[in-house]
Image (cartoon, coloured by chain):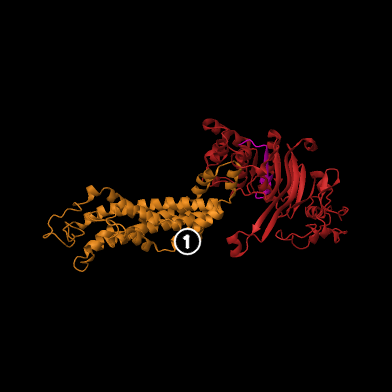
Chain colours: A orange, B red
Amino acid sequence: MVRHAGIASGVIAVIVVVALLAPWVAPYDPIAQPDIIGLKNLAPSFSHPFGTDSFSRDVLSRCIYGARISLSVAALATAIAITLGTLYGAIAGYVGGAVDAVLMRIVDAALSIPRVLLLIAILALWNGLPLWLLIVVLGATGWFGLSRMVRAQVLSMRELDFVAAARALGASGPRILFRHILPNVLPTIIVAATLGVGHVIILEAGLSYLGLGVQPPSASWGSIIQDGADQIGAAWWISLFPGLLIVTTAIACNALGDALRAAFDPRENAVTMAELDS
Amino acid sequence: MTSARTNPALLQVTRLRKDFPVRQGLQHSLFGRNAAAIRAVNDVSFDIARGETLGVVGESGCGKTTMGRAILRLIEPTSGSVVFDGIDVATLHGAALRSMRRKMQVVFQDPFSSLNPRMTVGAAVREGMLIHHLAEGRAADHRVKTLFEEVGLNPDYASRYPHEFSGGQRQRIGVARALSVEPEMIVCDEPVSALDVSVQAQVINLMQDLQRDRGLTYLFIAHDLSVVRHIADRVAVMYLGRIVETASADDLYSNPTMPYTQALLSAVPRPEPGRQTARIVLQGEPPSPANPPPGCVFYSRCQHPLKDDDCTRVVPPLEEKTPAHFAACIKQPSQLP
């Protein structure tokens, strides 16, 4: 498990560093179309490792720049989702009673709508969607599950003696929530964030593939797949390489999330201890 | 310490009651109607003088912890008054309640759940000072160190986390946290029952030293009768949410009046061989607090030779049977067999 976590975080680190250094790492300009007739749909070669697309653009450079968009959309949308989900769940769990009942029924209702369907419905209303709005929409639809988990943990933690001791000391509600309860919910939040990033990368790719996500000429991994989709038989490299990147990143995020969950969960540790003994 | 009785009462609890609603089914949860209630604390009255230790004993589920928490307003009492130093705590709200909390502190039973695992123990002890603006910055650090020394811990440990300490050390930290706001009274909710016997003695002695040095008042909840006998000036015995007998510790242990107390004390092992008194073995379980019997709560298990139908009709009041010795039994006290 530890070894998986090491590989996963290594993969994520490499992709993040390459994305950050895109202007220096990318061999070509990602949107330059040097020779739309002579250099289009070139198969992978030494000078174009991922080949070129139908506008003669270098697919590797587009993937490197696309990583910036795919990763930042995923990270920012997840940050929004984590913030909303944590606050919402914490308030429901801490206040309890009728407030909790109402807030959680809203979440139940929201969870009953498939997220992709909800996103398509929202995004289809805009033409030429700005990137920040895509991020906000992805974030605003991604916190329902987390809010439930946070609420459940806050609910059980609220009854612990150290919380009672803080109340007996005269601590205010927000102080108890932010100083005593939420730090103990942090493992759940970190795991949810890691898993969430992987999920949003796939989601954004799917939406971009449908033309509802990142708008041209900027490219995300999903929209590069879309560029190559209509000639997948003739120029398979255009779609294959960004697809591999999506799969790799998502698996790495999930593996890291699972490893973190195991590391934070004492029962899970107990199992590995027993395995070591046998 | 009988002189403590002549002091004015620091805490006066009158007819305190705590019901926990029992929700049954969807209909009740939707419309908030509660079909039944568990009477965890039922009509409890007592007072504690300044500097005194009142021990509260009773078996598991008799409501002693609930009573302690209701007095501290960690849970809301259903009715009754809790007058601390002339102020009714049961009706305070908001800032007035928070500033009142400074005077009444608590030490919990479980040394593992009573400290925040993600907060250094120094920060835990410091928190109360910050909340009540007693000290800040260096002055607070200094006070934390002084408190650590006072409870017998190395002051350098303040920067460590709870999991680095043993159960006994954690209880000392819990005591230091309670002392950080300079309370007048501490509710000790089974503070030593989770500890090894040798460590129990250390913590008990620490608490007695602190009481002497700081003039503290204790409400000491426990199920260990010998611990209570050692630390308490007066003892109250609880059964099914009610106080059934209260007297000075010496009087209660040498001369138990209420049949339940007699049965309870007969279970205490005596150190001298051959002096073991006949054990009164109670039959059955205590009745459900959701459906307490009419009359005397102890009737179903009572071994009193004179028990009769009157006991099921009258709720026995807590009467002064001999001076300063109150018992809730309508019959003449029977001698211990």
Q: Nearer the viewer, residue A93 or B305?
A: A93
In the rendered image, residue B194 lying in the magenta stretch gets the answer: yes
Q: Nearer the viewer, residue B161 or A234?
A: A234
Residue positioned most to the top: B139
Residue B337 placement, left or right of A244: right
The residue that label 1 is drawn on is: A108
**Residue A4 appears in view:** no
In the rendered image, residue B329 lying in the magenta stretch gets the answer: no
Q: Residue at x 32, y 59 (%)?
A: A125
Residue B264, percent across and down? 78, 54
Residue A49, percent across and down? 20, 58
Classify 10 Å Cα crowding around label 1: few (below 14), some (14-19), many (20 and above). some
Query: Which region is colored magenta?
Result: B181-200
Q: Residue at x 67, y 42 (%)?
A: B89
The quarter of the picture where the N terminus of chain A appears is: bottom left
Circle 1: element type? helix
Image: B95 above or below B270 = above
Residue B99, percent across and down? 61, 38
**Residue B56 appears in view:** yes
Which chain does tag 1 point to? Answer: A
Q: How many marks?
A: 1
Residue A131 placement, left or right of B313: left
Q: Nearer the viewer, residue A59 or A265?
A: A59
Residue positioned most to the bottom: A233
Residue A84 placement, left or right of B75: left
**Three-letter code, disc 1:** Asp
Residue A228, percent across and down? 22, 63
Residue B207 sits in quarter: top right
